[in-house]
Amino acid sequence: MKKISIVVTLLCLLTGMQSVAQINPLAQKSLRAMTGQVPSAFSTNMGLSVRSASMLGNRITKVQFALQDATYLSSAELFGRVQASRVFSQVPAVKLHALENKFSHLDAVAVTHPQSGYVSALHSMSPALSAELAADSNVAAMIDVLNIQQYMRLNDNQFPEIYTILSGGWLSATSCLDSMEGNRAFLGVVSILVKEQTGEVSPAVVEQLVALHAQARNVPTVQDVLKGLQEWQQANRSSDAPKLPTNMEGLSLRNNPETLWLTTEIRLLQLTPNIELPEVLKNAKVTQ
C-alpha cells in the first residue's frame, strides 16, 4: 500500500489562543486521538506516524502525518531492543533510567527539529545527558538509526543512497549527496557498519539498519552490486574488495565516495538474512 500523507492544520493551535481552543475542542481531541496525547512521531492509537511538525512557542501549528511503516521503530522500542541485548549492563540504574526516559520521548521532540536531527533533539532535553553516556557507541548508533528512519520517512521510504546505478552500470549521484540530512543519514550507515565490524554496537541496531535497507524502495539489485565490485576490481587491478574504514575520524564524502558507497552496499547485503548471494559477494572481505 502506498504511503498517504495527511496534512492537518489546526487553527485552534495556530493562533495559540485559549479562547479558540475552547471554540474548537474537536480539533484538539482529534489530534490527541491520532498522536496518543502528545505530538509524537509514533501514534499509540492509530497506524500513523508524524513526518514533520511546526511549532509556535509550545503549540503545534501544523502536522504532517503518514501511514506508519511497520519497518520503522519508535525511539522507545529501539531503546528497548538495545537494552534487551544487555549492552548497558554496566550503566548504573539511575543513569539507565534517565536514558530510557529520554528515548521514550525522543520522537516527540525530534519531529520539531527536522533540520538538526535526533542528536540535537536528544541534547535539547532536560536533564542533560551525562558525558559518559553521550560518548557511548550504542547511544550514537541508536541516534544514527533514528536519523536514517527520519530521512526515509521524509523521502518516500528511500534508503540514504548517495548513488544509483543507471543502465550500462553508470553511477548517478542522488539528491542524498547534496543535502545535509542525506549526508548525515548516509554517514550514519557507515558509522554503524564501522562499529559492527569490531563489535562496538548492539546487534539490535545492526538488525534494524539491515531491515531498513532491505525494505527500502531504492536499493540496488544484487547483480548491480556484483557488477560494481567487478568494475572496482578492474579499475584497481585487484581481486580483493574495498574495505570499510576503521573509524569515522576525518571521514568525508569528498574523498572517494563511490568506493565507500559500494562497500556499504556489499556489507549490508552480507548481513541481510535469507538472501541468495553469489559467492563473490558472499566471500568479499570488506571488513578490516
Image: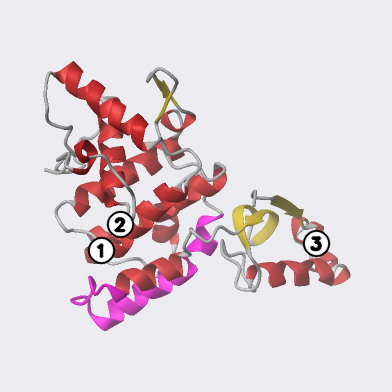
Pointer 2 with pointer 3, Cβ within 8 A:
no
Give the CA distance from mark 2 to mark 1.
7 Å
Identify the magenta region: 84-111
Query: What residue does disc 3 label?
Result: 12
Give whichever of 245, 207 is nearer the camera. Answer: 207
State the image coordinates of residue 103 (x, y, percent, origin top left). 42, 68
Query: What residue does disc 2 label?
Result: 206
The label number, if any, that marks residue 178 in the structure image = none
Packing grade of label 1 (10 A; few <14, some 14-19, many >=20) is many
Image quadrant holding the C terminus, namely top left
Name which residue lies at 21% across and 40% down: 279
| Magenta span: chief secondary structure | helix
Q: Amino acid at mark 1?
A: Ser
In the image, residue 273 lies in the stretch drawn in magenta: no
Work out whether residue 56 can be spotted.
Answer: no
State the image coordinates of residue 231 (x, y, percent, origin top left). 25, 21
State the image coordinates of residue 260 (x, y, percent, origin top left). 26, 32
Work out whether residue 167 can be spotted.
Answer: yes
Answer left or right for 200 relative to 129.
left
Q: Amino acid at mark 2?
A: Val
Question: Which residue is farthest right?
Answer: 23
Give whichever of 138, 120 is nearer the camera. Answer: 138
Query: What residue does disc 1 label?
Result: 202
Pointer 2 with pointer 1, Cβ within 8 A:
yes
Name which residue lies at 50% across and 56% down: 110
Give the CA distance from mark 2 to mark 3.
42 Å
Packing grade of label 2 (10 A; few <14, some 14-19, many >=20) is many
Give the CA distance from mark 3 to mark 1.
44 Å
